[in-house]
Image (cartoon, helix red, strand yellow):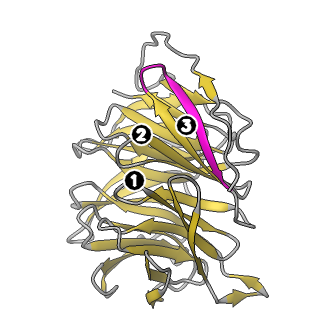
Amino acid sequence: MKIMKNLSFLIFCCINILISSKTKGQFIFDQTPGQHNQDVWTAIYSPNERYIVTASADKTAKLWSVDSVNKEINSVTELNKHSGQVNTASFSPDSKKIVTSSDDGTVKIWDITGKEISTITNNQVIQNKPTKFNSAYFSPDGSKILTSSIDGNVCFWNANNGNKIICKKDHGDKVWSASFSEDGNYITSASDDGSINIYSAKNLSLKQKIFSGKKQRIWYSTFSKNGSKIGVTYRDTIAQIYDFRSGKLLLTLKGHHKDVNWIDFSHDEKQAATSSDDKTVIVWDLTTGNIIQKLEGHENWVNSVEYSLNDKNLITSSSDRTLKIWRVK
């Protein structure tokens, strides 16, 4: 594994900016272009918030350390054994491992030093090409890997040896994302078939299917931190919030001008943040559905967004090849 030199990138904000719902936000950390050569699809905090991992179309994932005191993002190592673009990269619950999903038809598990531990291979072939893995995440107890793929499958794999446990094909088209509830009891998945599936995490039994009523691709679905709501993004200008138990639509969030790619909930359940192809992030009031804040500063699509543990910061990834960390209200 290629180990990169410990490069520090000086942060260039530290300017007091008046923030309103219609103005630019303040980014307090900025990883300058050049470390990734193509789109950065995801940027995710480690559970201990000492690290960030990014996944890119340049076929690599990169590990970064965060120096909050000196406002620096330091490059630690590069994960470069995939032969296709890396769609997601995320941490194990103990922050000691990383899992990556790729268009090359593999999921790889790495230790925090960048050493490859094991590889999961999708043996399905579509048009003489390996079936792409769109997402891969550790279960909250760290024992399983949850994947979604373009063949319509949602699967569990053993996190220790990479062996397949079970796959379910309850969607009628590509599955773009699958993620756990915080308590590890449920899974939500999003598909081109216009539905959001809810599974039991015990055996991947289908508990509920929510039909959005929209023909557009569903990019992403995720649980709120207490598990009571599900946030959904579309190949459309809106995001929606559903009640987990009843499947009832609670809110439609309107404010973006292009596709909405990602949604995350604050830990206090009062806010949600969405990222969009319109180069912005919007922070929403979940009581009213109103815009609290719009963050502008990326120069291309904003592909992912995630709250810090204290809900004071957001981390974003973009097709401008950068990640940013923003101060939010």
Residue shown at 43% from the left, 73% from the top: 145
- Distance from label 3 to label 1 (Cα)? 29 Å
Q: Dot 2: within a 10 Å radius of its alpha carbon, few (fewer than 14), some, or many (20 or more) residues? A: few
Which numbered circle lies on residue 95? Answer: 1
Amino acid type, callout 1: Ser
Residue shown at 43% from the left, 76% from the top: 160
- Distance from label 2 to label 3 (Cα)? 26 Å
Residue shown at 70% from the left, 64% from the top: 81
- Distance from label 2 to label 1 (Cα)? 9 Å
Question: Which residues, given as a range, are shown in magenta?
Answer: 68-79
Does the rendering let one see residue 194? Answer: no
Question: Whole-percent x and y of residue 292?
Answer: 35, 31
Residue shown at 55% from the left, 37% from the top: 280
Which numbered circle lies on residue 280? Answer: 3
Q: Nearer the viewer, residue 272 or 122?
A: 122
309 displayed left or right of 123:
left
Report helix, strand or loop for mark 1. loop
Marks 2 and 1 in Cβ contact (< 8 Å): yes
| Residue ranking furthest to the top | 16
124 displayed left or right of 288:
right
Report helix, strand or loop for mark 3. strand
* Mark positioned earlier in the residue sequence (2 or 1): 2
Q: How many marks?
A: 3
Amino acid type, callout 3: Thr
> The C terminus appears in which quarter of the rendering?
top left
Question: Whole-percent x and y of residue 163?
Answer: 49, 86
Position of residue 304 relative to residue 149, above or below, is: above
Amino acid type, callout 2: Arg
Quarter where residue 93 is shown: bottom left
Q: Which residue is mark 2?
A: 50
* Mark positioned earlier in the residue sequence (3 or 1): 1
In front: label 2 or label 3: 2
